[in-house]
Image (cartoon, grey):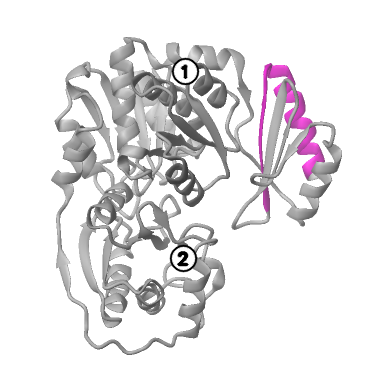
């Protein structure tokens, strides 16, 4: 079959519908998934994209044609999908393109929770099967049954926090017409919070803004609402709900590494001495805070397939990525957007402090550049030049190149999908951060 190999990404399949990913390809992906895993049953859910029903119908048709049954969990968030895969201990396919623009669709694939199919683990095997397009005829056609796990999922989440300890905080939540709204509305009905919902209706036409809250234009309205309403906090979710973002009481967007540090510290108070995983882009504030709270910080390369694997290998309590993925041992080492929202409400209630007060020590000490992208003709050559130029620092190759000095450090890694280098830099003073950031960008772009 003629299929563009670039739709097979580092962690999932994503392409523009119908030019790069269509029903014919989805059907073959379903066949290949069953063939590769040798499974007799697959959990399948989808997000709210307008091409979702067509792609869902085609992929489940391919799964059933190959002799496997389908458990249809309907339109769900990705953490609901992970919950279903864990409950049944089965492989799964989620029809979603996460936070990509509305023209895209794709698949997130679970082998067995918490292990996913990714570029390093099965995704390229799947690609070869799809491209070959030759599948053994099955002895039977699989069945499909529908299940609704919403209430069970919400009950599971509520067990992860002390609801009785929550105070009636005012929360503004923007789900951006993604798939999270219905579940979040049901969940928050059970909490003593004053909820201001924004765009809770799933709508693949995205009438209000895009699905990626890391883009400033997609969170600007939420930031303004938090301030205008004098809310305690604001929460934003990406399209499929596996990423979660925080706006504090000042209307400020809070980086994911600072949130990892605060949540890690709070969890370590309840469960001392545990391990916490963070990614190579993160602020020194994460390992410093974890150590100060008596925990063990573990650095890992970027990407949910690697983070989940490391957590499972180490039996780690919690993990956070700069990009808003938060993972929990008590949730099968999987990432969820809804769980950190509950945890933060509990943390604010327990401490009696505003989020801005909890952040103040981190903001006074650690100065981060945020992720800055540069287009380069040859990413590998540039990484080698960086290693040579900054050889007087401590050089590591966990993911791209990381270099540390006494009062500043940086990580540069290549994009999985574009001719880009991504710079994350931090220093212990704003002046140093700005000077080193500009120096690095001039070198990378020179």
Residue 337 shows in the view: no
Residue 47 % position (x, y): 30, 56
Residue 394 visible in the snapshot: yes
Return the residue at label 2: 16
Q: Quadrant of residue 330?
A: top left
Secondary-structure class at tag 2: strand
Q: Please give the name of the residue rendered at 46% of the width and 62% of the height, measured from the top-left corner.
A: 14
Above or below, 9 against 202 in this view is below
Instruction: Give the CA separation, mark 2 to mark 1.
Output: 45 Å
Tell me: 91 left or right of 133: left
- Residues in magenta, as a range: 420-444
Of labels 2 and 1, earlier in sequence is: 2
Which quadrant would the C terminus be assigned to in this image?
Answer: top right
- Residue 74, by quadrant, is bottom left
Given this view, does label 2 or label 1 mark the residue nearer the observer?
1
**Residue 325 picture quarter:** top left
Nearer to us in this view, 384 or 379: 384
Which numbered marker is on residue 293? 1
Instruction: Judge from the rendering whether residue 176 lies leftward or rightward of residue 319; answer left or right.
Output: left
Mark 1 neighbour class, 10 Å CA radius: few under 14, some 14 to 19, many 20 or more: some
Side of 374 where 252 appears, left or right? left
């Amino acid at each position: 079959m003629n299929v563009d190999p670039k739709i097979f990404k580092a962690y999932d399949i994503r392409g523009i519908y119908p030019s790069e990913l269509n029903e014919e390809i989805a059907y073959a992906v379903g066949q290949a998934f069953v063939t590769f895993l040798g499974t007799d049953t697959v959990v399948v859910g989808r997000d709210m994209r307008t091409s979702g029903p067509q792609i869902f119908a085609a992929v489940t048709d391919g799964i059933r044609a190959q002799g496997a049954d389908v458990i249809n969990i309907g339109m769900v968030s990705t953490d609901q999908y992970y919950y279903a895969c864990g409950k049944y201990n089965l492989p799964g396919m989620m029809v979603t393109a996460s936070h990509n623009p509305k023209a895209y669709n794709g698949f997130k694939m679970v082998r067995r929770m918490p292990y996913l199919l990714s570029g390093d683990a099965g995704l390229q095997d799947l690609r070869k099967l799809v491209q070959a397009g030759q599948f053994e005829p099955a002895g039977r056609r699989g069945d499909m049954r529908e299940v609704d796990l919403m209430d069970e999922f919400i009950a599971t989440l509520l067990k992860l926090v002390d609801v009785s300890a929550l105070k009636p905080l005012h929360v503004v939540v923007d789900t951006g017409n993604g798939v999270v709204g219905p579940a979040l509305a049901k969940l928050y009905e059970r909490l003593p919070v004053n909820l201001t919902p924004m765009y809770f209706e799933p709508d693949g036409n995205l009438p209000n803004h895009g699905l990626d809250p890391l883009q400033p234009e997609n969170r600007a309205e939420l930031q303004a609402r938090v301030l205008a309403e004098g809310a305690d906090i604001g929460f934003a979710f990406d399209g499929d709900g596996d990423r979660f973002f925080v706006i504090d009481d000042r209307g400020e967007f809070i980086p994911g590494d600072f949130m990892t540090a605060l949540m890690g510290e709070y969890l370590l108070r309840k469960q001392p001495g545990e391990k916490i995983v963070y990614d190579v882009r993160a602020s020194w504030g994460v390992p410093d805070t974890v150590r100060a709270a008596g925990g063990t910080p573990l650095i890992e390369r970027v990407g949910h397939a690697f983070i989940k694997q490391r957590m499972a290998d180490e039996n780690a309590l919690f993990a956070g990525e700069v990009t808003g993925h938060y993972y929990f041992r008590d949730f099968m080492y999987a990432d969820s957007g809804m769980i950190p929202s509950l945890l933060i409400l509990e943390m604010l209630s327990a401490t009696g402090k505003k989020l801005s007060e909890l952040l103040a020590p981190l903001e006074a000490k650690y100065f981060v550049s945020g992720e800055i992208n540069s287009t380069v003709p040859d990413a590998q050559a540039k990484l080698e030049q960086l290693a040579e130029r900054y050889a007087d620092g401590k050089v590591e190759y966990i993911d791209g190149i990381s270099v540390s000095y006494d009062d500043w450090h940086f990580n540069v890694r290549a994009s999985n999908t574009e001719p880009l280098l991504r710079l994350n830099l931090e220093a212990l003073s704003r002046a140093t951060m700005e000077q080193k950031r500009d120096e690095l960008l001039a070198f990378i772009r020179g």
